[in-house]
Image (cartoon, rainbow, N blue to C red):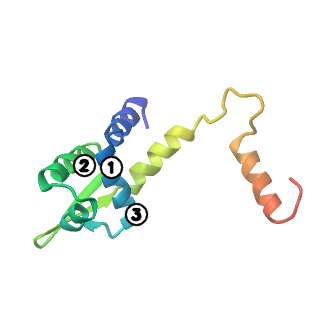
Amino acid sequence: MMIDDAAVRLEALGNPTRLRIYRSLVRAGHAGMAVGKLQASLELAGSTLSHHLKALVIVGLVAQERQATTLICRANYEMMRGIVDFLVAECCADACDCAPAEAAQSSTDAGARGERA
């Protein structure tokens, strides 16, 4: 993911209402949630929800699907993983005291098995 793409998506999540919406959709899982149920659970006006959903759809964080008369919204988990991966890709890259991710994971796995890394 390019830095400009990540910035646009993180900016969308920087709004408290949009973050609440997105978290609700993440919690809903792959089945998603009907707009009406989302509106009721977050106690938002329809126009407010629509405005914020549009912003999340535009940046690719949320997908919508019409099922008959119901509009279902789903978090785009691939995009979410892309943002998280972008944020941690260079974790501790400039720190001398931080082990590479693979070594840290190997140590964790070995420790869980009662072995030494």
From the viewer's perspective, is residue 97 above or below residue 23? above
Q: How many marks?
A: 3
Q: Nearer the viewer, residue 7 or 15?
A: 15
From the viewer's perspective, is residue 12 above or below residue 74? above
Measured as percent of width and height from the top left, residue 110 is found at 81, 59
| Mark 1 vs mark 3: in front | 3
Q: Count neighbours of disc 3 (C-alpha within 10 A) and say few if under 14, some if 14 to 19, many if 20 or more.
A: few
Amino acid beneath label 3 = Arg
Amino acid beneath label 1 = Leu
Where does the N terminus fall, quadrant-wise?
top left
- Give the side of residue 63 with respect to residue 116, left or right: left
From the viewer's perspective, is residue 18 above or below residue 112? above
Residue drawn at x 71%, y 28% as measured from the top left = 95
Residue drawn at x 79%, y 52% as measured from the top left = 107
| Mark 3 vs mark 2: in front | 3
- Work out how far the residue at label 1 is from the one at label 3, CA to CA, in angstroms: 14 Å
Tell me the quarter of the picture where residue 91 sits.
top right
Instruction: Return the disc, 3 or 2, that comes first in the chain's sequence.
Output: 3
Name the mark on residue 57: 2
Residue at which label 3 appears: 27
Amino acid beneath label 2 = Val
Q: Nearer the viewer, residue 10 or 86?
A: 10
Measured as percent of width and height from the top left, residue 7 is found at 38, 32
Q: Count neighbours of disc 1 (C-alpha within 10 A) and say few if under 14, some if 14 to 19, many if 20 or more.
A: many
Measured as percent of width and height from the top left, residue 87 is found at 52, 38
View extreme (right): residue: 116
Residue at which label 1 appears: 61
Dots 1, 2 in contact, CB < 8 A: yes
Helix or strand or loop: what does disc 3 sit on? helix
Residue drawn at x 60%, y 34% as measured from the top left = 90
